[in-house]
Amino acid sequence: METKRADTVAAPGRFPLRELLLFAAVLVAVLGVYAIMGPAYSTRMLVEASCYAILALGLTIQWGYAGQFNAGVMGFVALGGFCAMFFSIPVNEAFWGSELPGELGRVLLYMAAAALVVFGATRLDRLGVPKRLRTVIAVILAVVLYLVVINALRGVTDQIESRAGFIGGLGLPVGVGWIVGGALAGGVGYFIGRVCLGLRSDYLAIATLGIAEIIKAFLKNSDWLTRGTATVSPLPWPVPGPAEVGFTLARALYLSVTAVMIAAIFFLLSRAYHAPWGRMIRAIRDNEISAAAMGKDINRRRLEIFVLGCILMGIGGAALASFNSMFDPQGYLPLNHTFLVLVMVILGGPGNNLGTIFGAVAVYIIWIMSAPMALFLMDMAMALGAGLGWETPTNMDSRALQARVFVIGLLITLVLRYAPKGLLPEKVRHHG
């Protein structure tokens, strides 16, 4: 008896006309910026766009691959920036040459011990303690130990601020900070995912947004660790800086580093997308009940994809902070570091890695150039109105900056109306 085997039905190949036209349009826009603004400005724009492309790739695998709406991108970007600062800036001898590191380490050990005690209290029901009594004991222990530990920590941090300013850095290579930034963002993402991934998508968005604000508030108010609003600068680069080779060449070298990173990430994500793991993730996204009925571990896979996206956001945030050569916790804004990344993914197409890169570059060009273009149009209008006796308004520069929000809002409205799946939608291959 002859048996039949189900083979994969490959979609017929097509000439990528849309992709070529869209990337050609982006290339024309980049060349136009080079002609108008000069090579130094334009190269800086491309470096920042490439860093945002890494952030957008992290979001597109969460949202596009698994349907997880993460509204807290800013928090993971800030964690990456903190690691880029902490691991790369020079060692602060005023801190490390004193007894303060030992005192800080002792308080951190107390903190870890307190966390273990509270965790143990949450498991008292296994010893026969009633669950309600267990909860009361755990809450009382958590409150008391928190007050004790935070009082001891405040005493040490006050000494650090008064005697050394802040902890300083570790003086390690820049790449170490980028790697640890991704690992820290992934670790925090793991903790958030364990708690929040069981929530519906709208509640998950609210939870991640709140956690991002908590991370920002902690970094901004921890003067002993980050100098708070005083900022930390300059941060070293992984390539020769502008003082050594000039602005344009230094930025071009930095762009080559981020371009290699994007190429490596794109290759790995594409392989994962077309592998059985990627098909399983998309199956969970499209029909979670059916995937669970086939024996798939839904929670584990969703946690994997969330952590992976957070790792990329941490790496992108570290690269962006190093390029800006400054760590400013107050400078992390939901508009710049969450909403803008969402617009990039929406424009390019959630779930399409190539579309996400296109969206990141295109949206960032629009974001950067909307202010000078608006200022140019305002100047023309004022020159025309001067002959008619119009009174010229003040603060034209700040008024032009507001055009960014209007242009991005108009862009996202048009995309959602005419291309809700993005300009380069996800290509779904059917198997059977």
Image (cartoon, grey):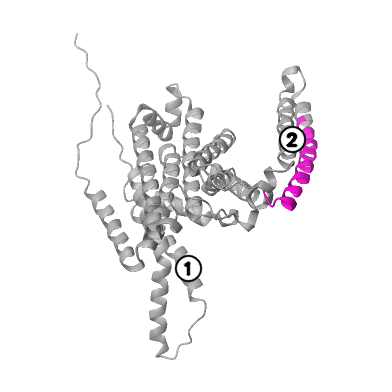
In the picture of the structure, the residue carrying the numbered disc 2 is 106
Residue 156 is covered by the magenta coloring? yes
Q: For the magenta stretch, what is the residue range?
A: 138-167
- Local secondary structure at mark 1: helix
Position of residue 366 in the picture relative to residue 328 (left or right): left
Badge 1: how crowded within 10 Å, few (<14), some, or many (20+)? Answer: some
Q: Nearer the viewer, residue 157 or 396?
A: 157
**Along the line of sight, which residue is nearer the eye, 249 or 60?**
249
Report the residue at 54% width, 40% height from top: 185
Q: Could you say whether the residue bearing mark 2 is in a helix, strand or loop? A: helix
Give the x, y percent position of residue 356. Answer: 37, 47
x 36%, y 67%: residue: 37
Q: Position of residue 389 (x, y in %)?
A: 44, 91
* Res 401 label: 1
Q: Which quadrant, please, contains the N terminus?
A: top left
Residue at coordinates 57% horizontally, 33% vertically from top-left? 194
Q: Main secondary structure of the magenta part?
A: helix
Mark 1 or 2, closer to the camera? 2
Examine the rendering and report whether any part of residue 420 can be seen.
Answer: no
The vertical placement of 369 against 1, above or below, is: below
Check whether the beta carbons of the residues at disc 1 and disc 2 lie within 8 A of each other: no
Residue type pointed to by label 2: Arg
Task: Using the rendered view, name the quadrant where residue 252 is placed.
Answer: bottom left
Q: Is 125 within the magenta?
A: no
Rounded to the nearest whole Å, what is the CA distance between mark 1 and mark 2?
48 Å
Decide which of 241, 7 is in the foreground and name it.
Answer: 241
Three-letter code, disc 1: Leu
